[in-house]
Amino acid sequence: CNAEAIEQIIVVEFVKQIANVPVLHCANERKCSPQYGAMLKRLGTRAGVSDLFFPRGNSEFKGIWIEMKSSVGKTSPAQLQFLDEMRAEGYKGIVAHGSQEAINCIVDFYSLDPMFKK
């Protein structure tokens, strides 16, 4: 597991234990053969899709897309473009550098008990 994956696991565990909101991980980070990659693209896999999707909305947005990064991680142009497209569709889209930043966003978005924010 790399640092980014560990941060993401912390967020997902928080959501499962505390927030009780649906969360999906879009597994785009795999390495595969060119043939399998071509098939995945035909099935709808797309570069830049954010790591986490929360399909439950609030009074302002339809849901949240979160691109997880480590403290030194950088977003790619495809990731930024995807977030811009999702914002245009009525979703909140953020880049979170670390689990606490993502958790703070989730707490604010769903009006959870502020004791979970740091």
Image: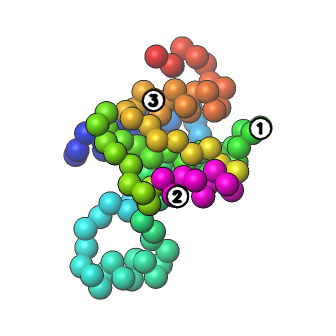
- Circle nearer the N terminus (2, 3): 2
Image point (50%, 45%), residue name: 66
Residue 27 visible in rendering: yes
Look at the image and say whether residue 82 sits in the magenta stretch: yes
**Residue 19 pos. (x, y %):** 56, 32
Residue extending farthest bottom = 35
Report the side of 35 relative to 22 (left or right): left
Image point (38%, 62%), residue name: 28
**Residue 72 pos. (x, y %):** 29, 37
Measured Cα–Cα span from mark 2 to mark 3: 20 Å
Q: What kind of residue is marked 2? A: Phe
Q: Indicate which disc residue 59 carries.
A: 1
Question: Which structural element holds mark 1?
Answer: loop
Marks 2 and 3 in Cβ contact (< 8 Å): no
Front residue of this view, candidates 3 and 86: 86
Say which residue label 3 marks. 101
Overall secondary structure of the magenta section = helix
Q: From the viewer's perspective, is residue 99 above or below residue 85?
A: above
Measured Cα–Cα span from mark 3 to mark 1: 21 Å
Q: Indicate which disc residue 82 carries.
A: 2
Measured Cα–Cα span from mark 2 to mark 1: 22 Å
Question: Which structural element holds mark 2?
Answer: helix
Give the magenta part as a residue range. Answer: 80-89
**Residue 112 pos. (x, y %):** 62, 24
Look at the image and say whether residue 17 sits in the magenta stretch: no
Image point (37%, 33%), residue name: 98
Residue 14 visible in rendering: no
Front position among marks 2 and 3: 2
Front residue of this view, candidates 28 and 112: 28
Report the side of 71 relative to 20 (left or right): left
Q: What kind of residue is marked 3? A: Glu
Q: What kind of residue is marked 1? A: Ser
